[in-house]
Image (spheres, grey):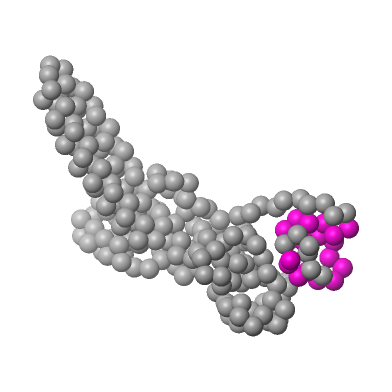
């Protein structure tokens, strides 16, 4: 039974489609577009650059750190110039400098926590920075080691393309090649970038060619 709203192929006798379309009444009830369960892992997503939730990949980690370094240098230069601008400027400059340091520390800490999450490690691993011998190890792990392949308990894989939310039940594929789940009890989810699909249960990628 094909849904007239999203073209999803549903089992015969289904009362409603996963997209929210009700076959009996023709009504449409929008559902959460965030996507399906990640197989038991948390759906924690990052709430922003200063958030301690979710995951980030190596590329984002390095990019944000580089931008922070440039911003800190520019802020420091501007504060130094302002400090020599006149009486009382030194006190204001000191307060501004303290603010920059606190904000930079917070953002750097949040980035490290989310990278540890990407490696499926607790964010409390940042406490090991207090031991000088561990800092080089953390640098290598956070900067160069790929995170968990697929979703983990801290959220979805940041390297996977963002899902559009539209579903597709393959007509010529009865089971997932990786986890063996039967379709259409689980569907492929269309990926926004290259048109490939993800199994709703195990999140593995598959080609739609020939379906």
**Which quarter of the image is occupied by the C terminus?**
bottom right
Residue 107 position in % (x across, y down): 34, 45
Q: Main secondary structure of the magenta part?
A: loop
Residue in the image at 70% along x and 82% along y: 172
Q: Residue furthest top?
A: 87
Q: Does the magenta stretch include residue 160?
A: no
- Horizontal side of residue 94 vs 15, given as left or right: left
Asked whether 131 or 89 is in front, the reply is: 89
Residue 4 position in % (x across, y down): 78, 62
Residue in the image at 42% along x and 61% along y: 118
Asked whether 139 or 45 is in front, the reply is: 45
Quarter of the image for residue 103 reads: top left
- Horizontal side of residue 53 vs 92, given as left or right: right
Residue in the image at 52% along x and 70% along y: 194
* Residue 70 visible to an observer of this rendering: yes
* Residue 201 visible to an observer of this rendering: no
Give the extent of the magenta segment.
7-24
Residue 207 position in % (x across, y down): 57, 78
**Which quarter of the image is occupied by the N terminus?**
bottom right
- Horizontal side of residue 173 vs 79, given as left or right: right
Residue in the image at 63% along x and 54% along y: 33
Quarter of the image for residue 91 reads: top left
Asked whether 183 or 111 is in front, the reply is: 183
Question: Relative to 150, does residue 170 appear above or below in the rendering?
Answer: below
Residue 66 position in % (x across, y down): 27, 52
Q: Does the magenta stretch include residue 9?
A: yes
């Amino acid at each position: 039974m094909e849904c007239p709203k999203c073209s999803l192929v549903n089992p015969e006798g289904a009362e409603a489609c996963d997209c929210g379309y009700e076959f009996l009444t023709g009504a449409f009830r929008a559902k959460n577009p965030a996507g399906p369960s990640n197989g038991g892992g948390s759906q924690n997503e990052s709430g922003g650059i200063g958030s301690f939730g979710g995951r980030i990949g190596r590329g984002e980690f390095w990019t944000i750190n580089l931008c922070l370094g440039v911003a800190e240098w520019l802020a420091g230069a501007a504060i130094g110039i302002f400090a020599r601008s006149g009486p009382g400027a030194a006190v204001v400059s000191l307060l501004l400098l303290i603010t920059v340091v606190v904000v930079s520390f917070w953002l750097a800490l949040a980035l490290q926590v989310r990278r540890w999450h990407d490696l499926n490690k607790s964010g409390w691993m940042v406490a090991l920075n207090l031991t000088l011998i561990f800092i080089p190890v953390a640098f290598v792990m956070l900067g160069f080691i790929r995170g968990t392949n697929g979703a983990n308990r801290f959220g979805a894989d940041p390297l996977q393309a963002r899902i559009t939310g539209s579903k597709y039940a393959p007509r010529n594929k009865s089971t997932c090649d990786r986890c063996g789940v039967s379709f259409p009890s689980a569907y492929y989810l269309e990926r926004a970038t290259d048109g490939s699909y993800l199994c709703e249960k195990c999140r593995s990628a598959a080609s739609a060619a020939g379906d």
